[in-house]
Amino acid sequence: MTADSSIYDSERVAAAYAFTRPPVHRHLVACLPGYLSRPGPMATALDIGCGAGMSTAALALVAKRTVGLEPHRPMLAHSGRVAPAAVFCVGRAEALPFSPGAFDLVTAAGVLNYADVALSLGEVARVLSAHGLFAPYDFSAGRRIRDDPRLADWHAEFQAHFPSPPGYALDLRALDYRAHGLALAGYEEIEVGIAMSLAQYIDYLLGEAGVEMALRGGGQEAQVRAYCESGLAGIFASGPREVVFDAQLAVARAM
């Protein structure tokens, strides 16, 4: 099932993704140099479904020129501030508006579950250079703290109140890369720990899909914030905590 992407037409979500999302992307992009055939940055990188631009900004770690592609124009409202050195455009994964072989790296962060996977993989293979890499990745909600089960317990309650729309799960290992001219070269499951204060964590939660769906149904952001503050105050009473995001990263090569 393809996930509903309509929440990304929201100016509120665009601002949340630009300014309150934790910097998980850069930790995953930092794993990519280990897959390169030669040291040094790649010339060009494309970030499919770039959202507000945080995932595109992370590509500056590994590429000289970066391009972000996003199907929902409102999400790009703050992209110039988030990734000022990148170029951004509106477009879809199923019909990439670029020439064959244009990119040495293509990434897709939590994107393929919104797209036609077969069409998208074919387009990725088309725009990759001869020795290019495709790196789809995704990460779960930040819902746990090591050696402290309270956040996981509370987040389960939160998820019951504000469920995500269906269609989100996607196993990146199971994609039919070879049928589209790609060969899976590696797969990693990575824990990314991000130090977050109570205020930062709540701001992050308010940008989640389930909250946006609740607000569309008539809920009030102030009420959601108060609910989060009441449940989380004790967990964050000692100050910022390291919230863990469970991530999966796949790396495929052009064949």
Image: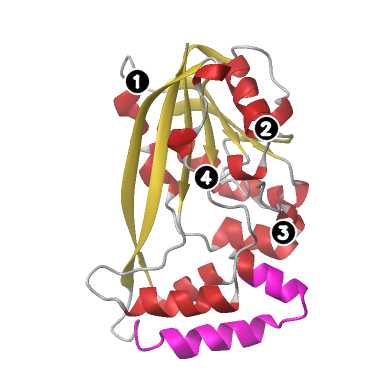
Dot 1 or dot 4: first in sequence order is: 1
Spatial CA distance of label 4 from label 2 is 16 Å
Magenta part of the protein: which range? 211-235
Three-letter code, disc 2: Ala
Please name the residue that numbered disc 3 is placed on.
Answer: 7
Please name the residue that numbered disc 4 is placed on.
Answer: 170
Q: Which numbered disc, 2 or 1, marks the residue closer to the eye?
A: 2
- Residue at the (42%, 34%) spot, across then down: 250
Q: Are marks 4 and 2 in contact (CB under 8 Å)?
A: no
Q: Is residue 149 visible?
A: yes
Dot 4 or dot 2: first in sequence order is: 2
Spatial CA distance of label 2 from label 3 is 18 Å
Q: Which label was assigned to residue 111?
A: none
Query: Mostly what secondary structure, the magenta segment?
Result: helix
Spatial CA distance of label 2 from label 1 is 24 Å
At which x and y percent is residue 138? 47, 46
Outermost residue toward the left in this view: 147
Q: In the rendered image of this protein, does residue 148 appear above or below residue 13?
A: below
Spatial CA distance of label 3 from label 4 is 19 Å
